[in-house]
Image: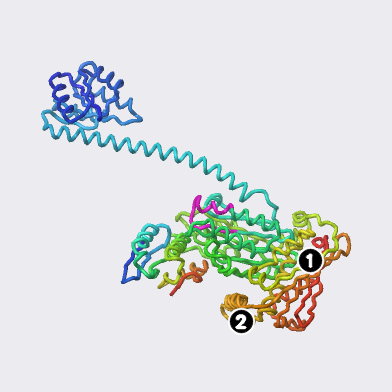
Amino acid sequence: MPSILIVDPSYSNRLYLKLTLKKAGYDVFEAKDGEDALNQFNQFHPSLVITEIDLPLLSGQSLVTEIKSLSEETFYPIFVVTNATNPELIQEILEAGADDFLQKPYPEKLFLAKISSLLRNLDFYNDLIKSKELVSSLHSSLELEHKSAERIFEKFVHGPRKEVPGLKTHISSASIFNGDVFLSSISPAGNVVVLLGDFTGHGLPASIGAIPVAEVFYSMVRKGRTLKEIASVVNEKLLLILPVHVFFSCTVIQVSPRHKSAKVLNAGMQPLIMIDDKTREVTEYRSTCLPLGITPSESLGLVLSEVALEGHEQFILYTDGVVEAMNCDGELFGVSRLVDALLNTEGLDIQRLVTDSQNFCGSEPFMDDVSIIKLSVDDIFKAQFNEILEAVNERIPAPADWSLFYCLGIHVLKQNENPIESIIDAMMGVQSLVNFKEDFHIILSELFSNALEHGLLKLDSTIKQKENGFIDYLNEKKSSLRGLEDGEITIEIKHAPLSAMKGRVHFIVSHNGDGKVDFDLGQSVSDKVFSGRGIKIIKSLSDEFYFKQGGAQVEAIYEWECSLHAS
Amino acid sequence: MSLTSRVNEDVVYIYVEGNFDIGCYDQFNKALNENLNTSSKFVIDLSKASYMDSSALGMMLLLREKLGGQSSKVEFTNVNDEVMRILCDAKFDQLFTINS
């Protein structure tokens, strides 16, 4: 029960108050003068003090001042119950800090109601103090956690990695913990790979997903995995760990200086911009697939755009902070203003772009949640002789004679949709030619899918040219494969050394189906025809290419040379 | 921004006004939980929505998940150009029925 200190020089007043309060269930202390009151207050810390104004030794007003000065951290309500009728006296004691007053005589009910109201205020006050303390302790521990997390994050996501040529970046510090992710590295084949992405929402939940993304990205780029594989694995990982409403939009570019080409993936971001520095021609790569972390990889619709590079191209990647900057009319900065702002500057200056976007906002708040990356193809091409070479400086052991032979029967073909990856890994196990792994992967994948799709399944690749044909084609492939009763694909890989730094790899893929893999070497291959594209790629990558047994066996020969990058 | 909902037989109509963003979350969640078990379809009317951010896209994924991953139960209607561009950039047309 709350305790109350009664301060009154009159014995009968004290007695009356004491009886009334005890009857109402309060614990009561009493004091007859100001000094006695102060001593008792210090000793018992009562919940409430009831005092008269006129007191011996220490006046009521001084008592109030003393108690209030003692209790800066806590709230001790003081209730003035007085005979005084002079309004000035009452005003003074209230100004000194007393919380309420009542003039005698008074109805008992009113007196008790005021007591409980003051004690209720005390409860409110104490609750408030408790929450304030809790908030402040949570805040400081959160601050500490943030700092530690930031350190881990810095090291992990933006940690030591290969220095990538041709990159200019503007990444505001606010954006790092807001779910923006920027990763860049160089693959063993000397390809520059850059990823810029953005998790839904803000704060810690949005940024935490960056860690698995970075882990997958760096380890897979290092192993020379393809963009498609990297995107699929990131997607599956995020699908597993992210809450339903959180997803990851990203743009990924891989620039291959050796093939003078680039691959672009836009998964749910604003259009990625490519500007030809010479002609000032602008190309937009719009999103072609869902953001990552929403659906399984096979239903993502992962399609990469292939770009042939002249060498003057600049790629601009950005998160939506810039284009979503809003002015006072509620207008967005938008992609076209972004392109204009860049074209207005000599060297496509991204800092100027940020300034323009800020100016556009005017007095409206500019969310400093902005990441912009510029990737200069020219710089990458020029850098390839020193920086990239250094970065991919893997020692290639002396080449040896070896061969691998795989026979994939009907059951394996049905169970394992993509056996090529493990076959390439097996090759690397025999002889580490990791710098050429990406080329091997492309060649073998194309040969294998041609044998499967056209040799065994006899699919019509003209389906792909229709609208949504690609998806139809994949569905068709799935159902034919399910219905396939017989069939076999064999893969033979032979390697022969040519010198200490040079070797030759034969990829021979055969099938026993009735389908004609009707590659006529003389056939003209249009870029727009998907079906012929695979063969065009193989021919461009390999040194020799043969059809045998009416297309039932295809052989591609690839010669590698260790100093290839420098030549 | 504001979000209101109206139920007609077993179809829930959700109207979004202004910016469709995290500020709509509480109202959206309320409309969702109140009608989830009794409704066969959710129609999101965006005729008065000026903008849609990624947290709103996240809410749509939540709705899709709560309806058992069946996108056919969610339909966007009266989608203006600006919002359509946002939905298409995110390729949400692969997940939902969207009518302009």
Q: Are marks 2 and 1 on the same chain?
A: yes
Q: Is residue A189 left or right of residue A115?
A: right
**Residue A335 is one of the magenta-drawn residues:** no
Spatial distance from mark 2 to mark 1, Cα to Cα?
A: 35 Å
Quarter of the image holding residue A273? Answer: bottom right
What residue is rendered at 30% in x and 25% in y?
A45
Q: Quadrant of residue A11?
A: top left
Q: Amino acid at mark 1?
A: Leu
- The residue carrying mark 1 is A404
Question: x%, y% of residue A286?
Answer: 57, 69
Question: Residue A317: where, in percent of width, then height?
Answer: 60, 61
**Would residue A142 appear left or right of A549 to someone viewing this image?**
left
**Left or right: A139 as drawn, with respect to A128:** right
User: On the image, numbered disc 2 is attached to which residue?
Assistant: A463
Residue A515: name its quadrant: bottom right
Measured along the vertical axis of the image, is residue A279 above or below residue A58?
below
- Residue at 61% over, 61% down: A233
The stretch in magenta equals: A196-211
Is residue A297 among the parts visible in the rendering? yes
- Can residue A287 be seen here? The reply is no
Residue appearing at x 80%, y 55% in the figure: A395
A304 or A497: nearer the viewer: A497
Tell me the kind of residue under disc 2: Ile
Quarter of the image with the C terminus of chain A is: bottom right
Chain letter of mark 1 equals A
